[in-house]
């Protein structure tokens, strides 16, 4: 009796409850491996790890500082763009056709912006400053746009079916992950300097609009990353299945385990991805926990809870908001680069708010806002049921309609509707958590 009471008390503690939830998720993934396939289970696990990293980034912004960022999609897309620009080999013919012109045009645009800033700061306020700003901005825009259009047309005309873009640097793809975080961080700094002084609802609108602009640019600027024609065949940080199937050590290992080399090579590759993603998740989680429990973390939570009191105590609220906004976006950018690496292709059309904004926010809410472990748990729970809701719904509908005639139109309609179960499942999970655990499965302490 005392042993049962001890185990019950342990499960009721935050740490015990967290271990119980993660154990349940591990059991669910094992069940998928046993009843579907281990390839499916490991694919789900990889995406759960990446989703948890994205949820950590949003939790840093919302859970630490109360910043309502709905531009997650744009920062994830910048991480994916970094993967192309870093890892893909350059296209020499495209560089020869228009590469110098593109670089010169971008430099001209940067000079125009710097000139406008210089005039705004140095000239006295008045009509003359307004005319000077208008002349510099319009002149710089038209000149830049003219030469930029000529150069990009030349780049996009180089074998457009296969390339039609400048390519990348041809560096190892793992370097693209921190570069993706850097791209997202720079974009977040620009966004934050403009919009962090706004109210929370205006900040949400601004971040959503800017993320849509980022994705629109990636879709239509073919010279950058082929636009909607996509970039396929991104390099991998793990071995290729065909190379494993030709390696003696791998064939011996498969024979020793009694596995088919073809199937086992796919499982082995997915295990390598899981190991890499786990290392990154644990590293970011450790840093997040250290930051949350440091004096900086306590200051951020004080600002979140009462900005007026924090400002009265001498804290620069806007600067701290900018800092945490950039940090969270860096984490999202890293996760975006990891996701593109796992997919093996860059597809701008896939950056949809439902996948990269709504789901990530649901993960943070369900897991527990302000709790890093809760964000990780939310990433596992939501992504697992997002993927498995359809096969579970199909099984449920087939079971419920098994007594109906084969040619029943109602049965056909219910079975066909199983594909929409995931949206209903997400809504049901969110409602249940908000009803019985309003602060999330692992609430902030």
Image (cartoon, grey):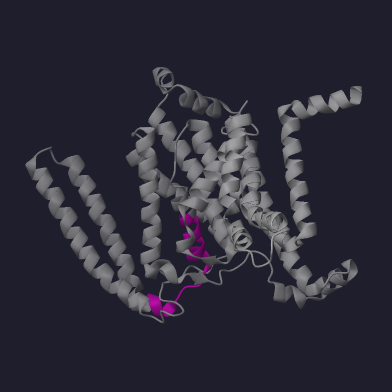
Q: Is residue 77 visible?
A: yes
Q: Which residues are magenta?
A: 77-95
Report the residue that reaches farthest toward the bottom: 159
What is the quadrant of residue 289 in the picture?
top right
Report the residue that reaches farthest toward the right: 1
What is the quadrant of residue 267 in the picture?
bottom right
* Side (left or right) of 332 relative to 217: right
* Side (left or right) of 24 relative to 7: left
Please tell me which residue is depicted at 12% across the width and 45% down the height of the picture: 130
Percent x, y of residue 444: 61, 28
Q: Quadrant of the C terminus?
A: top right
Percent x, y of residue 439: 59, 30
**Relative height, residue 408 to residue 186 (above, below):** below
The residue closer to the viewer here, 423 or 399, is 399
- Taking the magenta stretch, the answer to whether it contains residue 92 is yes
Please tell me which residue is depicted at 56% across the width and 47% down the height of the picture: 54
Please tell me which residue is depicted at 18% across the width and 41% down the height of the picture: 122
Percent x, y of residue 18: 71, 35
């Amino acid at each position: 009796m005392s042993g049962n009471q001890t185990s019950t008390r342990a499960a009721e503690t935050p740490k015990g409850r967290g271990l119980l939830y993660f154990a349940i998720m591990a059991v669910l993934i094992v069940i998928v491996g046993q009843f579907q396939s281990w390839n499916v289970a490991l694919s789900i696990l990889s995406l759960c790890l990446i989703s948890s990293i994205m949820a950590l980034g949003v939790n840093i912004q919302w859970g630490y500082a109360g910043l309502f960022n709905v531009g997650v999609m744009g920062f994830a897309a910048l991480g994916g763009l970094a993967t192309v620009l870093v890892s893909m080999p350059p296209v020499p013919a495209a560089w020869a056709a228009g590469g110098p012109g593109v670089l010169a045009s971008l430099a001209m645009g940067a000079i125009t912006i710097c000139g406008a800033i210089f005039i705004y700061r140095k000239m006295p306020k008045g009509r003359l400053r307004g005319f000077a700003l208008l002349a510099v901005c319009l002149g710089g825009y038209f000149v830049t746009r003219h030469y930029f259009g000529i150069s990009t047309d030349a780049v996009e005309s180089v074998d457009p079916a296969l390339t039609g873009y400048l390519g990348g640097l041809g560096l190892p793809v793992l370097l693209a992950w921190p570069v993706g975080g850097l791209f997202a961080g720079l974009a977040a700094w620009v966004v934050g300097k403009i919009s962090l002084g706004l109210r929370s609802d205006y900040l949400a609108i601004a971040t959503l609009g800017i993320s849509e602009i980022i994705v629109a640019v990636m879709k239509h600027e073919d010279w950058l990353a082929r636009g909607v024609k996509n970039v396929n065949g991104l390099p991998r940080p793990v071995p290729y299945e065909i190379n494993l199937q030709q390696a003696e050590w791998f064939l011996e290992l498969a024979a020793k385990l009694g596995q088919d080399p073809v199937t086992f090579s796919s499982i082995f590759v997915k295990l390598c991805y899981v190991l890499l993603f786990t290392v990154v998740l644990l590293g970011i989680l450790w840093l997040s926990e250290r930051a949350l429990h440091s004096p900086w973390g306590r200051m951020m939570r004080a600002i979140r809870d009462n900005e007026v009191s924090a400002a009265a105590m001498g804290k620069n609220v806007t600067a701290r908001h900018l800092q945490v906004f950039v940090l969270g976006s860096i984490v999202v950018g890293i996760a975006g680069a990891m996701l593109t690496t796992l997919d093996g292709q860059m597809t701008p059309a896939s950056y949809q708010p439902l996948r990269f904004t709504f789901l990530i926010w649901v993960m943070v809410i369900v897991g527990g806002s302000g709790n890093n472990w809760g964000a990780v748990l939310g990433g596992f729970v939501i992504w697992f049921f997002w993927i498995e809701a359809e096969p579970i719904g199909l099984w449920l509908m087939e079971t419920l309609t098994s007594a109906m005639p084969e040619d029943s139109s109602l049965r056909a309609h219910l079975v066909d509707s199983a594909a929409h179960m995931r949206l209903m499942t997400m809504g049901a999970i969110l409602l249940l958590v908000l009803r019985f655990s309003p602060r999330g499965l692992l609430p902030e302490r």
